[in-house]
Amino acid sequence: MYGGKTLFETRGDSVIKKEMIAMLLAGGQGSRLGILTSKVAKPAVSFGGKYRIIDFPLSNCINSGVDTVGVLTQYQPLRLNTHIGIGIPWDLDRNSGGVTVLPPYEQVGNTEWYTGTANAIYQNLAYMEMFNPEYVLILSGDHIYKMDYEVMLDFHKSNKSEVTIAVMPVPYEEAKRFGIVITDEDKKITDFEEKPENPRSNLASMGIYIFNWKTLKEALVAMADQPALDFGKHIIPYCHKKGMPEYAYEFNGYWKDVGTLNSYWEANMELIDIIPEFNLYEEYWKIYTKSDTLPPQYISKDSIIEKSIIGEGSNIYGQVYNSVIGCGVTIGKGTVIRDSIIMNEVTIGDDCVIDKGIIAENAVLGDKVTLGAFEEKVNETDPTIYTNGIVTIGEWSKIPDNVTIGKNSMVSGITEASDYENGKLDSGKTFVKAGD
């Protein structure tokens, strides 16, 4: 038992009754992360050196005493499934409950992929029935935060709520990007608006819900025929229309939707602030992850490291400033890295310069490679994805010696010197090598 607590369970003749189980939605593609999610589900993307994004809601579950978690996967699930395994790092390898990966499966009748957040839950009614819970916690697998779900459950119980939505205040100018709740003075929800043009409140839904099990089941069955069945568009409005008590649980801690390359980069950079807004090192609320057995870091006598995270098994011979370096990374002599994210098992040669780069797992950069050069230009293929001067290198990519790559650019694939005119790729360019 992690965190010193667990929600109760009882056993009947044929079922194990859990007070609350969690359903963790982890099937999203995360297309706004560009090349980072071309071969891996967004919740499995590396974060903070040694973690993956899904580690945060999973750790929240076990720290909150929630020991039964269904993880709903769909898009590119292999790495996510391998990472979760049987749940040992999170103490979720249980005979009763624990963690269960729930992909779409063939059925006798109408077989389909998960077509919406609530549709994914609906297709797993049988899994939830196994535990006959009092409450069901719905979570997203792609946010960075720490939350005690037991405190939210206590709020749910004390208000005799049937649906509780976790919300957080956002600036009014950003509110139109979220599902917005309108509440009375007791936090009872009086109205709900999905991405309103003129928001009447700044309380944004975090995509975290607690339902009474009977309420959730009724709503899912009643709305099952809706295309792309969704909580914000269908289930929450259904419960509201039926007059079921709905309350807003206000959360004022750190919460980050790392849905874009820039927000992903910012969240990593916030980890290395002198006093980080999001602290990975709190003893009472640990973040657990699957950890390989690796040797310690090696830092050469000529290297310089300032304000950075360095993962286990990394060999640093150059200079690293204000960056997050994953596990098993090699950084060559004379190389200077600033304001960058280098994921696991990346190899960077000698005399390179990396400014504001995101380099995905297992990429290899030759000697005298420069990332982040030239004047900034708008990306030619995905101007809303590759922005803010960030250079992105896809996983398993190779950049040959003596290549200079500009800002807002992306490279993916095993590239050769002949792919770069005069050894350069200008700012705003996208280059994906055929066969990648």
Image (cartoon, rainbow, N blue to C red):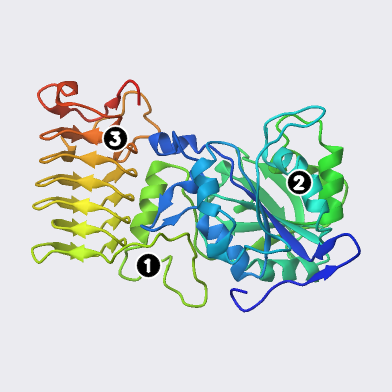
Q: Amino acid at mark 1?
A: Pro
The x and y percentages for residue 252 are 55, 65
Of circles 3 and 1, the one toward us is 3
**Where is mark 2, residue-wise?**
236
In this picture, residue 399 sits left or right of residue 38: left
Spatial CA span between label 1 and label 2: 35 Å
The x and y percentages for residue 88 are 56, 63
**Where is mark 1, residue-wise?**
276
| Secondary structure of the residue carrying numbered label 1 | loop
Tag 1 near tag 2, CB within 8 Å: no
In this picture, residue 408 sits left or right of residue 151: left
The quadrant holding residue 13 is bottom right
From the viewer's perspective, is residue 293 above or below residue 154? Answer: above
**Where is mark 3, residue-wise?**
397
Q: 155 or 88, which lies in front? A: 88
| Secondary structure of the residue carrying numbered label 2 | helix
Mark with earlier residue (3, 1): 1
Q: Amino acid at mark 2?
A: Ile
Residue at 67% x, 71% y: name it. Answer: 151
Q: 307 or 25, which lies in front? A: 25
Q: 166 or 333, which lies in front? A: 333
Spatial CA span between label 3 and label 1: 32 Å
Q: State the count of labels.
A: 3
